[in-house]
Amino acid sequence: KSGGPRVVYWFRTDLRLHDSPALAHALSLNPSRLIPLWTWDPHYVYRQRGSANRWAFLVACMSDVSGSLAKLNPNQKLHVVRAAPTQVMGPLLRRWKIDVLVFERDTDAYARARDAEVTRIAEEAGVRVVSLSGRTLFDSDEIVKANGGRPTMSMSQIVKAAEKLGGGGGGGGEPARPVDAPKELPDPLDAADMDLGGIEKEMEGDVDEQKPSFAGAGQGDFNAVQRTSSPGKITQYSVGLMGPDGTFSVPTLEEMGIDPADVTTPHVGGETAGLAVLKKYIDDEEYVGTFEKPATAPTDFEPQATTLLSPHMHFGSVSVRKFWWDVQDVLARRKKEKKHNSSEPVNLPGQLLFRDMYFAAHAKVGVAFGQAVGNPVARFIPWHLQSKYSVNERGEYRSEGTYLVDDPQAEEYFRRWKEGRTGFPWIDALMRQLRREGWIHHLGRHAVACFLTRGGCYVSWERGAEVFEEWLIDHEVACNAGNWMWLSCTAFFSQFYRCYSPVAFPKKWDPEGHFVRRYVPELARFDKKYIYEPHKAPIADQKKWGCLVRGDGSKKDDKGEGGEGRMYPKPMFDFNERRQFCIDKVKEAYDVGLYGDDEKVRTGEWKKL
Ligand code: FAD
């Protein structure tokens, strides 16, 4: 190995050692030296909204990988360099005399632009660059090709496209089998050779501000000008390239300016934790064999009804192909034993195919996938609180903030939805769970997304996606934007006359209202008869149960009239009236039939229609 190449393995959303085709490739080069590297990307640090919960999950993933690397070779760890990859990669590769740079392929619009730039820089420095697919079941670009160069907009398209991929793609609609985790690792460079002293001088651009050099290339720019969401908490992230102790350490939350007390999620990051979750489900053959997504209760908690592996899918702490094959092996065994198995798309493999469908659609559409204007697959609906965009000279869309259309109430509806004080306990419970824990069940996401857009508030899906972007631990541009388009009937799904009732729907799952009682504790003592419509309870009962239903939720306690105690808001509108309003408006828009990339949309002429 002494004559082998010097290799940098660049970790990003692949924070695992098992089934990593790119990492396996890096090791197959028989490197004389290997530097597992993480660069702190300012796009995520400064630009994307992100809650403390997501940062905590990420740091746990990084620490876990670092520990696993050290177990294979005590000289190894994740080497964290706290600078923008586009700025620091060139100087690092030169200083460390690297021969090959390897990373997992990422088809997100932002990541593509970043990786193209880093590849250019590396190649200019004489470094060979290898990137391999591993984030999805199938290579998203190959899926698009197999789908006739079009974005995958339905389950049957992704299934057919996957069937066409042969050989390395697994063939016959099946992804490749997972690759083994490494059993040993070469050393990094000797400490003196790793030294970064004075490297700032070699970095291009303003190191302190760490501005990415390609504006407009991702959902992080979404509403950069006037955000309705609070900005991410990271404000004082400047502790030098190698951290306070000068050892390439994984940063602590405090070093990033995050108060650990703001971490309120019970969900734990890291490959070790993720694989344990996967194993728990795989060991439960009955669960895996009979899993049917529409039959899982959105009101279940501790444990929730679905696997909650999505944050691990996002950070790559569990391989999606391992998830797929572990499930398939259970299904095959059960089939042999003549036991009932549920089928696609409602079973677990079906869920993973949905994920691949959104990834491939996003891979094709690019940056416009995350927004209404300029998006060729999104029907244009003149929602209230629509984003306003302009197109720059490179054809990239930039937000210029939001403007109200017709309805001064829309901003208020949006704020109350976000803050969990709509007066609809089911919606409020979900939004509070989202904020506190960073995850809600798929049908819960359905409920709040439908309510905000076409089933109540008539607010743009972009506003909702932005809140999910901030609070979800599993936030994934492709899945988030794709599902918001689905729920708002702008793409993928078009039955806009079918809306979720915030009363009848949860009642079906949870007639006692356990879920609401947990996340809206002021209603905990209400009789189940009123748990989804507390404003209908007689005042005497409200008093008896310790909570008055009045106001708009901006005040928590009623000190005025006898100090009865807690308050919960009245419903912010008549749901049936608003549902009809939305259905009528969406129908009108469907009749006009514009899409986001239509000239009339881009020029604002749609307002006259
Ligand atoms: P399970 O039911 O256990 O499914 C297993 C895995 O399949 C998930 O971990 C996930 O990776 C994948 N999956 C399941 N359903 C979907 C789906 N509809 N779309 C894409 N992948 C799916 N998922 C995200 O990963 N990130 C997001 O930002 C995101 N935003 C969403 C926004 C809205 C409005 C809606 C309706 C859904 C969104 N989803 C998103 C999809 C889905 O709700 C979550 O993936 C799922 O609820 C995660 O829980 P789980 O891991 O228990 O899922």
Image (cartoon, grey):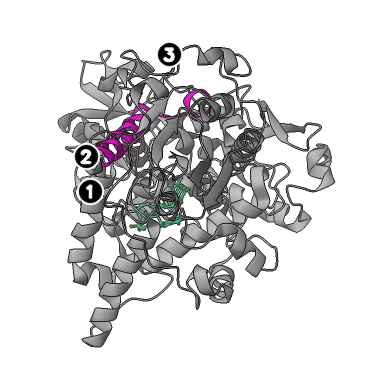
Please state if 466 lies on the left or on the right of 602 as rendered: left
- Give residue 134's position: percent from left, percent from top: 46, 55
Q: Quadrant of residue 129?
A: top right
* Residue 22 seen in the figure: yes
Amino acid at dot 1? Phe
Mark closer to the observer (1, 3): 3
- Find residue 240 and name its label: 3
Instruction: Pick whichever of labels 2 and 1 is earlier in the sequence.
Output: 1
* Residue 340 seen in the figure: no
- Per the image, the residue denoted by label 2 is 518
Amino acid at dot 2? Arg
How many dots with numbers? 3
Determine the residue positioned at 56% across, 72% down.
165
- Per the image, the residue denoted by label 1 is 301
Look at the image and say whether residue 504 sits in the magenta stretch: no
Give the quarter of the figure containing the C terminus.
Answer: top right
Q: CA distance from mark 2 to mark 3?
A: 43 Å
